[in-house]
Amino acid sequence: MKTIGAADTITKAYIRENAVFADAFNYLIYGGRQVVNPEELKEVDTTEIIIPFNTYDENKDEKKNAAVQKYRDVLKSTVIMQDSQAAYILLGIENQTDIHYAMPVRNGIYDFLQYGKQVSDIAARHRKQKDKVRSHAEFLSGFYKTDRIVPVVTLVVYFGSDEWDGPVKLTDMMEKLSSTLMKYVQDYKIHLIQPYGISDKDLQKFHSSLREVLGCIKYSKDKEKLWNFMKDNPRMNMDIMAARVIEVMTNMSIEISDGEETIDMCKAIEDMIEERACIEREEGKLEGKLEGKLEILTNLVKDGILNMQEAAKRMNMTTEEFRTKMK
């Protein structure tokens, strides 16, 4: 059985790999076209004190900083070419091994803290360079009229096999108000990739091992569909990190020898299916033995040879449970 700490650690390390990270965003934004280049991704440190904005105290004639500390899972910067123009962008992924029922708020905090940090950094750069302030408004904010911040796109990758039943936008977390009021409430939507409901056709849009990871999790509760998904897939000889994600998220027992860099997942799944079949056969035998024992004890009670309390004790049941079984 997976532990939350181990699952989080393994999936976070996996999604941090540039090839997997880029693959997720190429699926989300470009429908599988290879636009985000793994080699262009540069990791951004997320473990830092973030100063989201500067405020000005007119009474004390000084700046006041509000510091907040938050830790995003993974944040990377990259440059994407669009219409012959280079666009600098920040891409973030929050990996979830369990459903988070406040995800829109959580992601919104991360994004706006990042925007706040950019504003603070720009203001600090103006002060350091002693840039000329052109208006009182620019002096108060430290952010000039011509300054620009870098866009942030945050994606949630959910590694669970169940359907995501949490909110996908901020207003999902609110009581419904009249349409007159709700049109003034700012919304925030999350971008979500989840195994549940993803079609085999869409799985083909992934080009990294993320295709097999999501597919194995999707079919993990149906061994026949899982085997059909894997048996004709020539890519099932996968890297150890991907195999570890499948292992921890599906409770499979995958044997990995020291020094191995790849593993044949078809062989691993075949072994798992055979192991489960053996367990089911043994459980069937045990069930048969218990039914036989129950029948003998029931006849002894009916013949008056054994009282019901003693018979129930021999079956490790309460008297009421044994009476129900007799019926």
Image: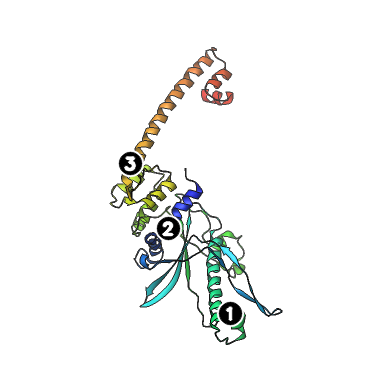
Which mark is drawn over residue 142?
A: 1
Q: At which x and y percent is residue 170?
A: 56, 63
Q: At which x and y percent is residue 26?
A: 38, 64
Dot 1: element:
loop
Task: Read off the residue under disc 3.
Answer: 270
In the rendered picture of this protein, how many numbered marks are placed on residues?
A: 3
Looking at this view, name the residue that lies furthest to the right: 59
* Residue for point 38% across, 31% down: 281
Considering only vertical position in the picture, is 235 above or below 141? above
Q: From where the camera sits, is residue 118 visible?
A: yes
Whole-angstrom CA distance, mark 1 to mark 2, is: 36 Å
- Quarter of the image holding residue 179? bottom right
Q: Nearer the viewer, mark 3 or mark 2?
A: 2
Label 3 vs 1, first from the N-terminus: 1
Circles 3 and 1: CB atoms closer than 8 Å? no
Dot 2: element:
helix
The residue carrying pointer 2 sits among few (fewer than 14), some (14 to 19) or many (20 or more) residues within 10 Å by Cα, namely many
The residue carrying pointer 1 sits among few (fewer than 14), some (14 to 19) or many (20 or more) residues within 10 Å by Cα, namely many
Task: Read off the residue under disc 2.
Answer: 15
Q: Amino acid at mark 3?
A: Glu
Question: Which of the pair 175/282 is nearer the observer?
Answer: 282
Q: At which x and y percent is residue 175?
A: 61, 60
Q: Nearer the viewer, mark 3 or mark 1?
A: 1
